[in-house]
Image (cartoon, rainbow, N blue to C red):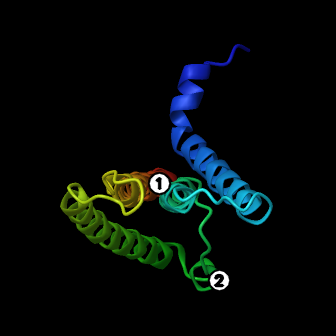
Amino acid sequence: MKKNWPKLILMNLDAIITGAALIATTSLVLINVFMRYFLNSPLTWSEEVATTCFVWTIFIGGAVTFRNKAHLGVDIVIKHLPARSRAVVQFLMDLTVILILGALTYNSILYAVNSAGKLSNVLQQTILWSTFPVAAGFGLSLIWAVLFMVQNIKEIFLKLNKKKEEVK
């Protein structure tokens, strides 16, 4: 079976960005440690770039984790509820997550827009490079949360229709 590489890359672009940012962060820190302690000539810009890469790792990586449903959760109580109660609790949890992510996305967009004209201390570049991934990460998580909620609602209706057909 032939793989569609462009589609595969596009579908995992968030994970690729996260991995590249993590590699860049680690590499920059290690290189700067070597330069500082062995060559006595630290890279003045590396901390700023490493911090920016780390922000990309955290917030885009958070969206990857959300997409893969890999966040920690305590569902021991939910598993013991009857199916109907479980569906209601799941809906309320999905709605709560969407509301919180919506507020975080909105505020992080405002933060990014307000920071667009500000320059970083060392490189004198816009700090939008550090604030954009916050909005992007929360925005991607919000999109996934909405999609997961729609998927959960569809599953509930499919189960209800299946039960109605069994009763007939």
Alpha-carbon span between mark 1 and mark 2? 21 Å
Q: Using a 10 Å C-alpha cutoff, classify the residue at mark 2 as few (fewer than 14 neighbours), some (14 to 19) or many (20 or more).
A: few
Q: Which mark is residue 155?
A: 1
Quarter of the view holding residue 148: bottom left
User: 98 or 161: nearer the eye?
Assistant: 98
Image check: 53 left or right of 31?
left
Quarter of the view holding residue 72: bottom right
Q: Amino acid at mark 2?
A: Ile
Viewer-side label of 1, 2: 2
Q: Is 37 placed above or below 61 here?
A: below
- Number of numbered tags placed on the structure image: 2
Question: In the image, what residue occupies the spot 48% across and 58% down?
Answer: 52
Provide residue 134's location: percent of width, then percent of height: 39, 61
Q: Which mark is residue 76?
A: 2
Quarter of the view holding residue 127: bottom left
Question: In the image, what residue occupies the spot 60% across and 76% down?
Answer: 73
